[in-house]
Image (spheres, grey):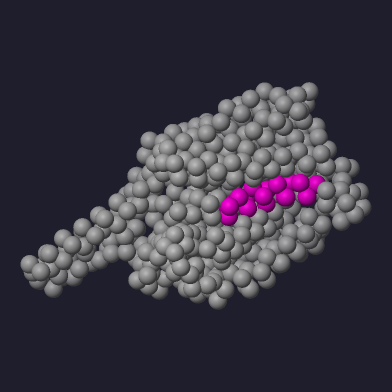
Amino acid sequence: MGSSAEEKGPCIGIRHLQSLLLFLAIAVNYIARLNVSVAVVAMTDAATTNLDFPEFDWTETERSYILSSFYWGYIITQFPAGFLVRRFGAKIILFIPTFATAVLSGITPYCVTWGGWQAFCVIRIIEGLFQGLIFPCIHEHLAKWSPPSERNRLGVFAYSGADFGSVMAMFSSGLIANSSMGWPGISYVSAGICGIWSLLWLILGSNNAPSSCLIGQEERDYVERSMKREDGFHAQKIPVPWKAIWTSVPFYALLIVRSAQGWANSTMQLQTPAYMHGVLEMDIKSNALYSALPFLAMWCMSYVYLAFADVAMSRQWMSLTTLRKSINTVSYWGPAAALIGIGFLDKSQTNLAIALMTINAGLNAGSGIGSILTIIDMSPNHSGMLMAIVNGIGNLFPLLTPLLVGVIVTETSSRSQWQIVFGMTAVVFFFGNLVYIIWGTTDKQPWDAVDFLQPLDSENNMQQNGSKPSGDNKQDETTTNTDRTATTVT
């Protein structure tokens, strides 16, 4: 076998299958998460859908509770997810929330008919509790399976499942609600696809390359060698350097920029149908179709950004940090300008409003390459835990924004009230990215090193025992520090 093949590994392999499974995992869970925005409109306005199913007289405040309730549970399990995935691996932890979502989606129509909006909120809270486990698993799984040279490609493809899921949630939900299945069919379809994915994952998913029964020796060696894990990394339990993480400026920059994205996502994903129905006066079927367009643009544009990133890195146009910051700037500041423009449009300018919303979402597709994958760049060894922290705190805002919109938008047909919502989101976009530009980095952090805490622990032990390091120990410490510096630079 030639050296080139050894360096690159097989063109298509099990690492690509794992990325595809992650893509589908995010997609089916996003469909179940986001179809509520269309379902609520259908459930409260039966005249625009199937009249054979009950209609609910819910106030705007009650609807905002339903839309935000998912995130009440979602933020609680983010942090525990980081520990669980480190202890049990991604396979079982990712299976549990998806299968639970299938069950909860299946019982939603019955529970809502029986218990009204309060029961709907309870179902959504429980679903959020389970789905809070997902993204720490996704990041941990990518870190185990994606060689650094393929991280952009495999990572962006996996995360594009969110855009695909958003498209399908918006596009299919309106069609289903208008069909013979009515609004209950939205939940039943979600239950079915989550159940199918769960079965596929049990058969095809693996925690890492060494544990996969499907992978060939050549690809397994390539994955392990490329990430320098021949020393049994998968079996190690590396302590989390909590103090170093919480005193890291680049970590806070990443936390802020991802929180800004969380705010914007919740505004666009959950409020778009209400805005189109209220201000643009679109019926539920056309509302769902046009609501899907921005996410279709986002899905397609994510691959455009990926192609640009591959070319830029292969031709060495810029450093990885500059690449990520440049793409993130386009994907944040472009949408900020578009959101301000959207707020000044009314029902006589429907086509322009839809065009701006589509451009907004398409530009924002770069946030995957721009900042999500920075977590793995900074710390592949602790990527799952970092994602749990960042996603947990970042998703406080999707919890709050529907409630804030419910306070600001007291009448969904009021354009001036929606201007406030979109203007606030634009400001968040702008300042979130500005912080990332100034203090963000893709450099591997010193606290990611496997032996980062060991010298400190050894010194503390010697001090407790009343001994001093010998000359040989000093030499070993110097060697360790040199190795750690080399690791950081690499």
Would you say 409 lies left or right of 221 here? right
Image location (x, y in percent) of residue 2: 44, 64
Residue 27: which quarter of the image?
Answer: bottom right
Res 469 seen here: yes
Give the residue furthest to the front. Answer: 2
Residue at (59, 41) in percent of width and height: 304
Instruction: Please give the name of the residue rendered at 35% of the width and 52% of the height, measured from the top-left corner.
Output: 444
Residue that extends furthest to the bottom in the rendered view of this protein: 213
Residue 315 rendering spot, x and y as whole percentages = 44, 41
Find residue 116 and report its horizontal and vertical position in percent. 77, 55
Q: Magenta residues, as a range?
A: 157-174
User: Is residue 415 placed above or below 373 in the rendered structure?
Assistant: above
The image shows residue 465, relative to residue 256, as above or below, that is below
The reply to whether residue 60 is visible in this rendering is no
- Residue in the foreground of this view, choosing between 127 and 384: 384
Image location of residue 276, percent across then percent down: 75, 35
- Residue at 45% x, 54% y: name it: 149
Residue under the image location 81 percent in, 39 percent down: 286
Q: Quadrant of residue 3?
A: bottom left
Given residues 85 and 110, the one toward you in this image is: 85
Q: Mostly what secondary structure, the magenta segment?
A: helix
**Is residue 92 rendered magenta in the image?**
no
Query: Would you say 382 lies left or right of 353 here?
Result: left
In this rendered view, identify the residue nearer to me: 192 or 1.
1
